[in-house]
Amino acid sequence: MVGFAGGVIGGFTAFPSAAVVVWLNLAGTSKSAARATAQPYIIVMQSVALALLALTRPELFGPQFLKLFAVSLPVVLPSTLAGVAIYRRISDRNFRQATLMLLAIAGMGLFGRAIAM
């Protein structure tokens, strides 16, 4: 049921791991088990979403997409390394707090954007 909810949420928010992250936190899963569960889930869901978009709306992957992708790489790669370094240094409790806080911030951003429309 959590995977289904994640798929539905991911389908309209492009944030498929929200339900999984909440579920893992409620279950008291360790940070390594939570990461080992959430990361493959995110990769698979995002890959499926990209494949479906490529099949149904190939025009979205034109020059503008490639330009934005190229511009984002220099920011994403160092940020990912910084995130891994932080992950290695924090406790399970701090990891749960950080993931839920970041999830709440993302949710407020989505909510705020929906209201602004």
Image (cartoon, grey):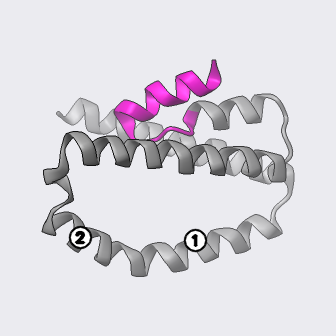
Mark 1–mark 2 Cα distance, whole angstroms, equals 20 Å
- Which element type, helix, strand or loop, lies under badge 2? helix
Out of 43 and 106, give the one closest to the viewer. 43
Report whether 44 appears left or right of 111: right
The nearer-to-camera label among 1 and 2 is 2
Q: Residue 59 in the image: state x and y as whole percent.
A: 13, 52
Above or below, comparing residue 91 to residue 113 in the picture: below
- Give the crowd class for mark 1: few <14, some 14-19, many >=20 residues within 10 Å: few
Residue at horizontal 50%, vertical 42%? Answer: 45
Q: Main secondary structure of the magenta part?
A: helix
Residue numbers of the magenta segment? 1-18
Which amino acid is tagged 1?
Answer: Thr
Q: Which residue lies under the disc numbered 1?
A: 80
Q: Which disc number belongs to residue 66?
A: 2
Whether pointer 1 and pointer 2 mark residues with C-beta atoms closer than 8 Å, the reply is no
- Give the crowd class for mark 2: few <14, some 14-19, many >=20 residues within 10 Å: few
Q: Residue 114 in the image: state x and y as whole percent.
A: 27, 32
Q: Which disc number belongs to residue 3?
A: none
Above or below, comparing residue 41 to residue 26 in the picture: below
Which amino acid is tagged 2?
Answer: Leu
Which quarter of the picture shows residue 66?
bottom left
